[in-house]
Image (cartoon, grey):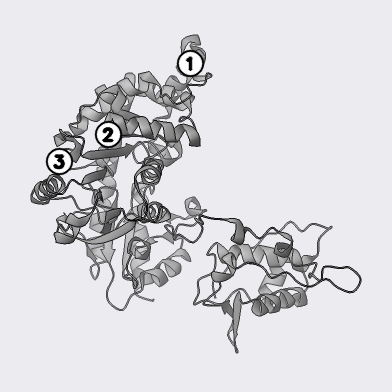
Amino acid sequence: MIDHYFHLDFQRTRGLQEQLREALVGAILQGAFPPDEPLPSCRDLSRQLSVARNTVALVYESLLEKGFLQSRPRSGYYLHPDYRELATRPAATPAAGPDGDDGQDPTVGWARSPSWGERIRHPAGPHQGILRPSNWRQYQYPFAYGQADPSLFPATAWRRAARETLQSKQHRDFWISDAVDQDDPELITQLRTRVLPKRGIQAAPGEILVTQGSQNALYLLARLLMGPGVRVGLENPGFRDAWNVFAMQNADISLHDVDEHGLCIDERLADCDYVYVTPSHQVPTGVTLSAERRARLWQQAHAHDQVLIEDDYDADLDLSSHPPPALKAADRHGRVIYLSSFSKSLGPGLRLGYLVADEELVRELRALRRLMLRHAPLHAQRLLARFLAEGDYDAHLRRYRAAHARKHDALRHAIEQHLGACVYASGSGASAFWLQAPESISAQKLAWAASRRSVLIEPGAPHFFDAQPSDRHFRLGFSAIGAERIAPGIELLADVMGRV
């Protein structure tokens, strides 16, 4: 049985059963319980919450009747295989009682809510996301991808830029104002002169749009360019939320395999209107698109009037001596839409990125963004501009890459020493290693078992878009974990793998 700790601040004005039932339903829908493990027993849960055992039993029975749970003799309560359907199923309206009562069970809190399932026209909830617990920082060995190591954040330099942004009247007068749909011209200048040239990109001010991260950029692009009948090529395995964003616009998504050379380019890809690609470090495998594949992709894009959406994942953290330039660097005809952000190098909570594209497209994207959020916070834009202008970002990247390289080498050595039965992609290592477990191992079960030992890994299944996704792949990120914890964490993971 999986151990769960529940803490509920019970309200005196509501019934215990109602509150416990709502808490359990919330935990179930958030994925807190593995489908093949029993829920906490009535005795354990009643002891944790200091309520009567019969109260817990009645709540479990009500969830059994409503289809959230199933009971297994001498084993306990488990999630029902179809429990997720209940989250979007409209609630039935009961008949009114003889005394005018509406007939509803007063302890069923959700029955009093509006029927949002009938009202929502474009549901986003059913789209699968990357599985990561919200309390991942509490894990002793967090092999999480895309998260920052707080000890490496350039706090002193950032504080200096923040102080200047706040104390200078010129800066302060700018960022407290409304820019309508414009971005900070200082940040645009820094992006043009300091950031983009490192990737071989030259851009005019009107070709740059500040975003709140690459995912925000993808949503803007999909909303503006995609819909029924528009075919989009997507790497498989690939970035799950790219699939989600394109699917929400009802685009025709065409899946294409990935091997050790990156995206496989074939005749089916030629039928696409857009191709979303992560050439620098493919998500999630980490492999780099080969020079030969790049050339073929370019030829195909020109021959079939395609537009490439380049998501420059992990480019700032590349550990190779001569990283390839961005695809956008060779673009002379506006055929590449380039996306990048500061999420990996500074921290995902910053929520600042940028898009480079043809000026006509950027104007339309800017107009669409205005309808959604006008612009990214100007204070954050100006602060980042000052941080870049003083050369602090370049200095930070040098230190960060050095620490990153040490973590990379430590993780690779630990994998080779303790996880020899696993296969990892040769190109892995930008910020994570992509592994394939032996045939007898389920990555999902491995992740659940490892979590009990305070080891966090990420199952790879959400990155596959097939009807039967692989359950043997998992990802080990090393950006958030301390270097000294990598070896003992992998040793623990190997021990767990031997017991699953």
> According to the image, label 1 marks what residue?
174
The answer to which quarter of the image holds residue 57 is: bottom right
Q: Mark 1 belongs to which amino acid? A: Phe
Q: Which mark is residue 324?
A: 3
Q: Mark 2 belongs to which amino acid? A: Ala
Q: Position of residue 424 (x, y in %)?
A: 22, 62
Q: Position of residue 370 (x, y in %)?
A: 47, 31
First along the sequence among labels 2 and 1: 1
The answer to which quarter of the image holds residue 43 is: bottom right
Relative placement, left or right, of 180 versus 261 is: right
Residue in the image at 51% along x and 57% along y? 123
Q: Is residue 279 at all visible to an observer of this figure? A: yes
> According to the image, label 2 marks what residue?
357
Mark 2 element type = loop
Question: Answer yes or no: do the residues labelled 1 and 3 have beta carbons within 8 Å?
Answer: no
Query: Gap between marks 2 and 1, in whole Å?
Result: 26 Å
**Between residues 1 and 363, which one lies in front from this camera angle?**
363
